[in-house]
């Protein structure tokens, strides 16, 4: 996908949220004409996320030209543009600041739309994960993995069998490689399999200590605690 927004902070936030959701952002632009030029010289991406008000070409301009060729999501701080967006058959309409939960719903809609057009379904998650052990490679069963931890730009796979170095370099890469696997980010460095949670202990200020299947407790941030509570129906 490709995204465009003339507000640098909004562009960075959207790119970060999409990355966390396991999406590949092929290109980013801060004005509409730059995106139009890119679209003319490259294969069309799966979808576009566009700010409505941009110099050169607005999101509505691009929507009018490309809506019949690929899904387009408009992003803006002005809800007044929603009617115009759907008049031009926008795939969805997001208000700034974009919320992660609302973005997840948009991505689900886009996936269903792409599948309806004959796109290939997302691959199944592997049942085993290759990790480094000594000078060789071993395959860990996904069911025995409790969580993934990033340290020094490296992702480690952790569980009752120990802590092993993976081939991933970010938690986003690990998440993208495991489609359909229920995962939750406890904090900035730890992402756990929801099924590996064995217990919770409430801490002050909306935070929790989380007991995982490896027998250890890990501190979850307030957001991580909220996400986990939602996943577990608490």
Image (tube, rainbow, N blue to C red):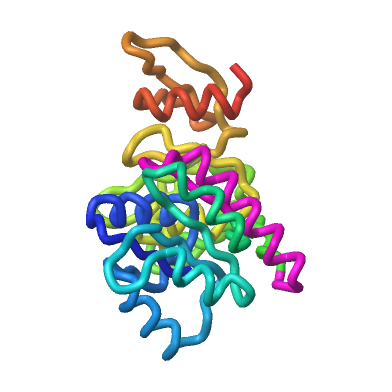
Question: Is the residue 97 above or below the residue 156 in the image?
Answer: above
Residue 7 left/right relative to 111: left
Range of the magenta residues?
A: 92-120
Judging depth in this view, the residue of 146 and 25 nearest the camera is 25
Question: Is the residue 207 above or below the residue 134 in the image?
Answer: above
Report which quarter residue 54 is drawn in: bottom left
Estimate the x, y position of residue 115 in percent, counting from the top left: 73, 65
Judging depth in this view, the residue of 153 and 123 nearest the camera is 123
Residue 223 in the magenta stretch? The answer is: no
Estimate the x, y position of residue 57 in percent, counting from the top left: 36, 72
Judging depth in this view, the residue of 55 and 126 nearest the camera is 55
- Taking the spot 31% from the left edge, 56% from the top edge, the residue there is 11
- Taking the spot 41% from the left edge, 32% from the top edge, the residue there is 186
- Taking the spot 57% from the left edge, 53% from the top edge, the residue there is 92
Estimate the x, y position of residue 177 in percent, counting from the top left: 54, 60
Report which quarter residue 132 is drawn in: bottom left
User: Is residue 139 in view?
Assistant: yes
């Amino acid at each position: 996908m490709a995204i465009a927004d003339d507000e640098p902070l909004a562009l960075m936030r959207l790119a970060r949220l999409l990355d966390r959701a396991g999406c590949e952002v092929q290109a980013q632009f801060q004005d509409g004409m730059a995106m139009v030029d890119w679209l003319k010289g490259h294969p069309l991406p799966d979808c576009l996320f566009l700010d409505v008000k941009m110099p050169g070409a607005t999101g509505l301009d691009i929507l009018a030209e490309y809506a019949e060729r690929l899904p387009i999501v408009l992003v803006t701080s002005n809800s007044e543009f929603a009617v115009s967006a759907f008049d031009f058959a926008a795939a969805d309409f997001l208000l700034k600041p974009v919320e992660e939960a609302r973005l997840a719903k948009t991505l689900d809609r886009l996936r269903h739309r792409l599948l309806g057009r004959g796109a290939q379904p997302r691959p199944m998650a592997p049942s085993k994960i290759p990790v480094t052990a000594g000078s060789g490679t071993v395959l860990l069963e996904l069911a025995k993995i409790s969580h993934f931890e990033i340290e020094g730009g490296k992702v480690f796979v952790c569980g009752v069998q120990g802590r092993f170095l993976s081939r991933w370099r970010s938690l986003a890469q690990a998440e993208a490689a495991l489609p359909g696997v229920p995962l939750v980010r406890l904090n900035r460095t730890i992402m756990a399999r929801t099924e590996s949670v064995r217990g919770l202990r409430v801490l002050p200020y909306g935070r929790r200590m989380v007991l995982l299947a490896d027998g250890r407790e890990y501190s979850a941030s307030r957001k991580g605690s909220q996400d986990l509570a939602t996943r577990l129906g608490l």
